[in-house]
Amino acid sequence: MGKDSIDASLGLLFSLALFERYRKNGLLHAEMHHVPGIRGRCKGFLHLVEGKVVACYVEDREGRRHATDKDILTRVDSERGPFEWTLSPNPAPPSANPRADIPVRPTQNSPVPKTIAPLNLDRLEGWTSRQKLMLSIVYDLIDGVTNIEEIKSHSPLPPAVTEEALRVLLSMKIIVMSV
């Protein structure tokens, strides 16, 4: 386990509640067994954005990914585990004070993001295709006219995920905010 990783092997359900309370970001992963539909040992993965699970899958021994549900993994963990869950931080963490960058509540004067650089997905080494897709979706919604609240309402992603993608794009200096 790396120095930045967090040991979460007290049980998945308990750990998820803590991560949600403290709004943790990252990839929660563990080696598991007895997962329905998967033979033998596998690895479970949950992507967290501000403590919420935004993606959940299992990777079998051959490296194939199988979409699954958080409830299935928590049930397997409580019945067959607990497994050694570890939270690794996101490759590009959000800004230190995210609320200063992006308002939580809708306002009439919601900032308008503007692109100042192209989004080069090939440079994002270590990012999953799903993370890249989320960034790309939000980046494509930025037109320099539409404010944050409108972007969140037009985005197919949950509002918290859209906000997180905006924070990441801002921290990467690909967009700027204007009021």
Image: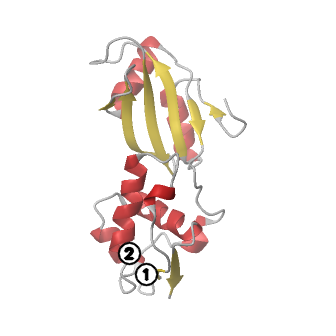
The residue positioned 50% from the left and 67% from the top of the image is: 169
**Residue with the most extreme right position:** 3
Q: Amino acid at mark 2?
A: Glu
Q: Which residue is mark 2?
A: 149
Q: Is residue 67 above or below residue 152?
A: above
Q: What's the mark number on residue 107?
A: 1
Quadrant of the image occupied by residue 80: top left
Precedes in sequence: disc 2 or disc 1: 1
Secondary structure state at the residue bearing disc 2: helix
Q: How does the figure colour the protein chain or chains? A: secondary structure
Q: Residue 140: x, y in percent?
A: 34, 70
State if disc 1 and disc 2 touch (CB < 8 Å).
Answer: yes
Kindly report the distance in space between the C-alpha atoms of the residues bearing marks 2 and 1.
Answer: 8 Å
- The spot of residue 16 in percent (x, y) is 50, 36
Dot 1 surroundings within 10 Å: few (below 14), some, or many (20 or more)? few
24 with respect to 138 (left or right): right
User: Residue 1 is drawn in which quadrant?
Assistant: top right
Q: Nearer the viewer, residue 30 or 15?
A: 30
How far across and how far down the image is residue 37, in percent?
Answer: 26, 18
Which mark is nearer the camera, 2 or 1?
Answer: 2
The residue carrying pointer 2 sits among few (fewer than 14), some (14 to 19) or many (20 or more) residues within 10 Å by Cα, namely: many
Image vertical order of residue 151 relative to residue 43, above or below: below
Residue ID at (41%, 26%): 74
> Three-letter amino acid code at disc 1?
Thr
Instruction: Give the side of residue 42 with respect to residue 141, left or right.
Output: right
* Residue 63 position in % (x across, y down): 39, 27
